[in-house]
Image (spheres, grey):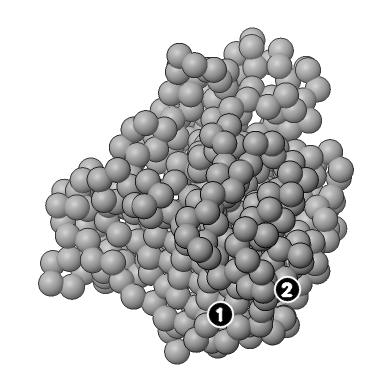
């Protein structure tokens, strides 16, 4: 039996044990002691923040969250970069934040956090190798968990995720993952229109060759975050620590398929039939690796992935599956860097009996997501345009308009005030999480959806390796 699978059996012992009292901690100052008395709903504890998403949760302030945030992490560049990002938000000229980071650094950081428990919500975004352990132990200690995706990266860990949600239910705490793509306005509009039968018709069943729903995402290792070139940790390129692409970014795409096609419905792993999956590497040379990590050499743990002096990262994956009989296709790929003026891109299509809803984000769209209505059936485009405009007027967005691109393609024109970027979406997810905390529970469809989602991604990895 894999040692990791024994974690549940020895969990109580782990929680009572200690790795020592070493490490350093910035002691709370008078400001932090005062704010602890204000009765905030949430006091955050950030654990081992190795990914920049951990900082993005704090890019804005929240009325419900204390300014004092406790960071528990091993000493090193991951922790320092996280603190630097928070400081940049505190010191920016426009709408600066007021976070007070109270930092403990030591190899016993997780035990120390569980011993101190100065907060009630654990934020996890970093090296994914031990994330399931962090989740399980935090929940068992009665702490809420807000976790970046992916929560698990191996098929054999799905049983641990099932156990995590059982513990959360027993302890009456919340476990929630950060699904930022639900807040992209074109995706929201695609979902809303897909529910309007007089516009979209009904979602088609599709086939493996022509799925009813397709979502494709292209990402880049070299990118700008919060106005600064991103320096990635070397472990990000190790699929044993970060996870392969087919279980990482695909989490968002699988989530969107469930969220759009089966809104607020209780899904189950038995609804998934994984038919086909594949994986392939992105090739990174030493100079590119140095540029994005700052390291002169590939670390020892990456030597297993070196071929002909270049790093092979299995960051790319594709899956074809059925969800409640509907055919879906998901694909993710990573390039080293985007073309000039470009960035990460998203393509999405939903095929209906009345029309197709298509999101494109290419050069023609200036790399800004745009929503098109294509392949209009059963009516003239002028009549359809009028009907669409009337329907859009009922949506919770004012000033939406429609432009005819040709005789069978319409484009939804979205005012700039509704355009929020990827970084801003973290605040929107956190605000939704706060709403669930106030309600005291997650909706049943959210929990069922998370389990079904991770069953899908890990099943795809298993299929791709067969």
Q: Name the side, left or right, on which 153 lies relative to 135.
A: left
| Pointer 1 residue | 211
In terms of image quadrants, where is residue 163? bottom right
Quadrant of the image for the C terminus? bottom left
Q: Name the side, left or right, on which 419 lies relative to 226.
A: right
In-front residue for pair 399/418 = 399
State if disc 2 and disc 1 touch (CB < 8 Å).
no
First in sequence: mark 1 vs mark 2 = 2
Is there any visible trace of residue 117 in the rendered image?
Answer: no
Up-down: is 261 above or below 226? below
| Pointer 2 residue | 202
Q: Position of residue 411 (x, y in %)?
A: 53, 53
Residue in the image at 51% along x and 63% along y: 407
- Rate crowding at label 1 as few (under 14), some (14 to 19) or many (20 or more) other CA atoms within 10 Å: many
Quadrant of the image for the N terminus? bottom right
Residue in the image at 23% along x and 66% along y: 283
Q: Position of residue 132 (x, y in %)?
A: 59, 60
Q: Position of residue 258 (x, y in %)?
A: 68, 67
Residue in the image at 43% along x and 23% along y: 88
- The secondary element bearing badge 1 is classed as loop
- The secondary element bearing badge 2 is classed as loop
Q: Name the side, left or right, on which 239 lies relative to 439.
A: left
Is there any visible trace of residue 400 in the rendered image?
Answer: yes
In-front residue for pair 207/392 = 392
């Amino acid at each position: 039996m894999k040692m990791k699978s024994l974690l549940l059996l020895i969990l109580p012992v782990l929680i009572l044990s200690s790795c020592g009292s070493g490490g350093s901690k910035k002691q709370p100052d008078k400001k932090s002691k005062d704010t602890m008395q204000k009765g905030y709903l949430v006091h955050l504890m950030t654990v081992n923040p190795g990914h920049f998403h951990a900082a993005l949760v704090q890019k804005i302030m929240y009325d419900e969250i204390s300014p004092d945030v406790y960071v528990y992490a091993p000493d090193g560049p991951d922790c320092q970069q996280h603190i630097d990002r928070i400081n940049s938000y505190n010191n920016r000229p426009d709408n600066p934040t007021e976070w007070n980071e109270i930092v403990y650094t030591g190899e016993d950081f997780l035990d120390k956090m569980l011993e101190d428990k100065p907060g009630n919500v654990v934020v996890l975004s970093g090296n994914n190798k031990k994330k399931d352990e962090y989740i399980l132990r935090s929940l068992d200690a009665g702490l809420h968990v807000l976790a970046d995706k992916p929560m698990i990266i191996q098929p054999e860990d799905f049983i641990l995720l099932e156990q995590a949600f059982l513990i959360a239910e027993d302890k009456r705490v919340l476990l929630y993952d950060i699904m930022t793509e639900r807040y992209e306005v074109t995706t929201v509009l695609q979902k809303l229109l897909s529910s309007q039968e007089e516009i979209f018709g009904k979602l088609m069943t599709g086939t493996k060759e022509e799925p009813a729903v397709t979502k494709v995402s292209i990402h880049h290792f070299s990118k700008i975050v919060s106005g600064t070139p991103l320096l990635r940790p070397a472990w990000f390129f190790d699929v044993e620590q970060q996870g392969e692409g087919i279980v990482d970014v695909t989490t968002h795409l699988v989530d969107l398929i469930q969220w759009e096609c089966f809104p607020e419905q209780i899904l189950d792993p038995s609804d998934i039939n994984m038919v086909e999956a594949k994986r392939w590497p992105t090739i990174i040379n030493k100079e590119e690796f140095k540029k994005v990590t700052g390291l002169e050499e590939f670390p020892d743990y990456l030597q297993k992935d070196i071929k002909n002096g270049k790093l092979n990262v299995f960051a790319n994956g594709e899956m074809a599956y059925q969800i409640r009989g509907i055919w879906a296709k998901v694909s993710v790929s990573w390039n080293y860097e985007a073309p000039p003026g470009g960035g990460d891109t998203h393509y999405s299509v939903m095929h209906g009996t009345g029309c197709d809803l298509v999101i494109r984000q290419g050069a023609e769209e200036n790399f800004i997501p745009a929503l098109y209505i294509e392949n209009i059936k059963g009516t003239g485009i002028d009549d359809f345009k009028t009907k669409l405009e009337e329907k859009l007027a009922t949506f919770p967005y004012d000033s939406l308009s429609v432009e005819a691109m040709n005789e069978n393609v319409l484009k939804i024109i979205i005012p700039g005030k509704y355009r929020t970027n990827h970084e801003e979406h973290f605040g929107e997810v956190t605000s939704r999480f706060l709403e669930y905390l106030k309600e005291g529970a997650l909706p049943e469809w959210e929990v069922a959806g998370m389990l079904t989602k991770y069953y899908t991604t890990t099943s795809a990895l298993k299929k791709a390796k067969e």
